[in-house]
Amino acid sequence: MLDVAVIEEAAAAEASLDPIRSRILAALAEPGSAAMLAGRLGLPRQKVNYHLKELERHGLVELAEERRKGNVTERVYRATAASYVISPSALAAVSPDPDRSPDRLSARWLLALGARLVQEVGSLLTGAARAGQRVASFGIDAEVRFASAADRAAFAEELSQAVAGLVGRYHDETARQGRRHRVVVGLHQIPDPAPAPATDTDRPDAPQENPR
């Protein structure tokens, strides 16, 4: 089972987004048969069997083993990956294009860059999996807390200069055996976590226990 699989076909994306099929995919992190899944999910076995066949047809689940029980052969399935990412290529003509309106200060442009990253790396992963190879890649993930908007702007400027300097130092357009790589650096505010639901003891008018 892969850690992450990229869904590139629209039909497979549609299959994965179906509520029942997404539940089946999650349940098949551990191999199971239609009968086992029906019990886990509280669904009729025939319905589970139908959705399993559709998921298998799109390569989202695979046959893990067949067990013989008397005159019946039980087919045990597993998900092909622990998690899935839908590539923008599944959206075809309406997928984001960062070349359409490049703007370093636009959050929408950053989102388009992220979409292209998923599409390109997903395509590489698919090709590498077929060839039995690994994809050479590198990533950095860090958090920074700025004291002010001015500090954030200064950080972005210094980062831009550093990346431009590195690209200028190592880029070699004349290298015949060279391979082109894309460098994407993004900076965005981290969304605040959703507030936890209030309990009775969180309310200011709730009676408090006497301290001892």
Image (cartoon, rainbow, N blue to C red):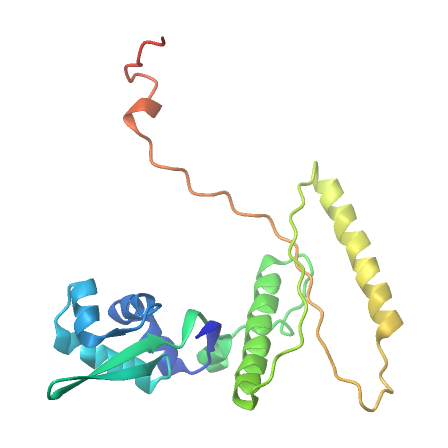
> At x 62% / y 73%, what residue is drawn?
100
Left or right of 151 in this view: 42: left
- Residue 79: name its quadrant: bottom left
Residue 67 occupies which quadrant of the picture? bottom left
Q: Is residue 126 left or right of residue 135?
A: left
Give the residue drawn at x 30%, y 83%.
65
Please give the count of numbered marks on the rendered protein: 0
Q: In terms of depth relative to the viewer, which is nearer, 97 or 120? A: 120
Does residue 101 appear left or right of residue 202 in this picture? right
Left or right: 161 in relation to 22: right
User: Which residue is pictured at 33% across the width and 66% down the height?
Assistant: 26
Whole-percent x, y for residue 37 in the image: 21, 69
The quarter of the picture where residue 131 lies is bottom right
User: Which residue occupies the foreground of this view, 83 or 157?
Assistant: 83
The quarter in which the N terminus is drawn is bottom left
Against 140, residue 193 (above or below) is above
Q: Is residue 54 above or below residue 141?
A: below
Indicate the position of residue 2 as horizontal and vertical percent values: 47, 74
Provide residue 80's location: percent of width, then percent of height.
40, 77
Decide: is 154 above or below 44.
above
| Quadrant of the frame with the C terminus | top left
Observer-nearest of 17 and 62: 62
- The structure residue drawn at horizontal position 37% and vertical position 83%, both measured from the top left corner, is 59
